[in-house]
Amino acid sequence: MKNIPRILFILLGLLALVVVFLTADFNFARSETNSQHNLTTIRQGYEIPTPTPIEQNLTVAVVGEGAFADKLREAILTELAASRLAPQGQWLATSDTNSQALHLVVRVDHTSSLWTPVYAQATVKATLGYASDHDLSWHGTLPISMETDHDAPLLWATGEFELSDSSRGLLSRPAYQRILAEKMAAEIVQSLNRLYTQGG
């Protein structure tokens, strides 16, 4: 009977640790990450268009359910704000792909993850669609046909991104989801930046 308070104290301590690892955001882990993507571009005109008018709000839709999609939405906004893609424009996030001002849509197609407090691994796949003229009505259709009434430069892009990661060390679950989202967001926005700085 004397051991009951001690056992109860240990159980409460373990429960507190579980809550911390499931809710707090901390990372003392080392990660090994591999990423790959393919990006197909369709252009109109001889010049590369300006990314978008800087005076308007620019909309990105991140489509997916769960905590990872929410963190990816935040991470993409952060990367876009620091990018060359209309740096003076205000990027807004939505989950509505029917937005009339949509410039970028990212759909989370697949997430597979194993998380423990000392080891985690995951694979994430996403599909991207981008249009410098904020017309993404073509996205998700094949074949893609660019039919416009003007000769202004246009740039459309569509592609797939895949991220594989393994991490070892003390790592909370929210921190791991954030790390994956930040790495995926950086890969996506850097690829779009290259379309304008390197032409592809």
Image (cartoon, rainbow, N blue to C red):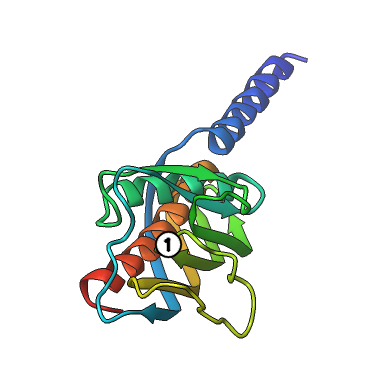
In the picture, measured across the screen, residue 111 lies left or right of residue 46, that is right
Residue appearing at x 67%, y 50% in the figure: 65
**In this view of the protein, which residue sits in the foreground, 138 or 170?**
138
Q: Please, which residue is most extreme toward the bottom here?
A: 143
Q: Please, which residue is most extreme toward the front here?
A: 149
Residue 78 rendering spot, x and y as whole percentages: 36, 45
Q: Which quarter of the rendered picture does the C terminus lie within?
A: bottom left
**In this view of the protein, which residue sits in the foreground, 116 or 83?**
83
Type of residue at label 1?
Asp
Give the answer, above or below, for where 41 lies relative to 9.
below
In the picture, measured across the screen, residue 184 lies left or right of residue 116, that is left
Quadrant hosting residue 4: top right
Q: Is residue 112 visible?
A: yes
Residue 13 rendering spot, x and y as whole percentages: 59, 25
Quadrant hosting residue 126: bottom right
Residue appearing at x 49%, y 70% in the figure: 164
Residue 47 rendering spot, x and y as whole percentages: 24, 76
Residue 141 rendering spot, x and y as whole percentages: 64, 76
Q: Is mark 1 on a helix, strand or loop?
A: loop
Q: Which quarter of the rendered picture does the N terminus lie within?
A: top right
Residue appearing at x 37%, y 71% in the figure: 154
**In this view of the protein, which residue sits in the foreground, 45 or 73?**
45
Q: Which residue is labeled 1 in the image?
A: 133
Residue appearing at x 40%, y 59% in the figure: 183
Figure disc tally: 1
In the picture, measured across the screen, residue 159 lies left or right of residue 50, that is right
